[in-house]
Amino acid sequence: MTSTSTASSADGLTAVGPRGNRPAPRASTADGASPARPGRRRRRGGEGFLVRYAFIAPAVLYLLLFYGYPIVKNVVMSFQAYDFSTFFNGSAPFVGLDNYATALSNPIFLKALANTGLFTVGSIIGQFVIGLGLSLYFRKHFPLSGVLRSLLLLPWLLPMIVSAAVWRWILEQDSGVLNRFLESIGLISAPIGWLTSSDTALVAVIMVNIWLGIPFNVALLYSGLQAIPEELYEAGQLDGATGWKSFRHITLPLLRPVVSVVLLLGVIYTIKVLDLIIGLTGGGPANATQTLATRSYELSFLEFDFGQGAALSNVLILIALLFSVVYLRANARAAKNG
């Protein structure tokens, strides 16, 4: 056999295989499976990419449509002379920062800003202190504790406007249940105008908002307390950590993440409360319960100056964002140091 025939035979063996015309077997992986073709792998990777984004597309579309668009529209409106006539002629001239300057220079703005701060701080302190106390109380197992916890959620489940209507009836000056009760036990000699006096209106609104926010605080704080192992309290008792010491050195440090969430969400929710104040006092009397949220509502839907209303609502959003950033940074720094 010549060298030429030997080379052709070798080429044939390589092309055809060891047994006649049967093709040579493919190389296999360690587990015996044939490797996937590159083209098929690329196609499967592209399909997986599309499937993943197809699942989140409805959520992204919902956020853009119902959150993104209103925020952008509100910002644009705050720089326009957007009033009731705009709905007919479609004209909303650009006015720059005039809406912000007019809204912030109004004397009612300072009163609303102060009321917003008092309303938020008073509500958060009352809700948190009472909610934490009830959470610690319900941590002890006693008969009907579960039923009482369920009943405690009722204020949270009621529509806000319904709660406002009920409390307006309770706090009514002449025939309200609260004044009649206080007169019957001798605490007051004359009815108090809880919602009609500028001295007591804001206090009454804060009291009602505390009542509404207690269930939220109890639900979150109680779940945080349930996550603390009992073994830590038993070990603390051996070291003399009982009562206040146990609460200070065991409960509070381990409850800090939950407390952070409760306070942050509570402030963000309380600073924008509108329907409760509208249902109880409408911002009166004499702007005694006027907040930034109610003032923005009045400018937009009572005075039909949507540009100023949008500007004031943007100021409220900036205040909430500023508080959130400062609070989260301070809380992260405290957690890192401590």
Image (tube, rainbow, N blue to C red):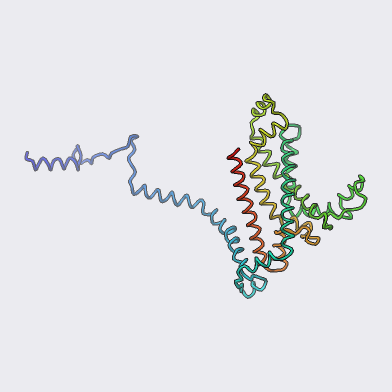
Task: Name the residue at the left extreme.
Answer: 2
Given residues 41 and 308, the one toward you in this image is 308
Is residue 169 shown above or below 109? above
Task: Name the residue at the bottom extreme.
Answer: 89
Q: How many marks?
A: 0
Residue at 72% over, 40% down:
132
Given residues 288 and 60, the one toward you in this image is 288
Residue 136: % across, % down? 72, 36
Residue 232: % across, % down? 64, 29
The C terminus sits in image quarter: top right
Given residues 299 and 246, the one toward you in this image is 246
The N terminus sits in image quarter: top left
Task: Name the residue at the front extreme.
Answer: 337
Residue at 74% over, 63% down:
108
Is residue 43 shown above or below 306? above
Given residues 335 and 21, the one toward you in this image is 335
Residue 92: % across, % down? 61, 72
Residue at 62% over, 49% down:
326
Is residue 317 shown above or below 102? above
Q: Is residue 330 left or right of residue 287?
A: left
Residue 88: % across, % down? 64, 74
Q: Is residue 122 left or right of residue 253?
A: right
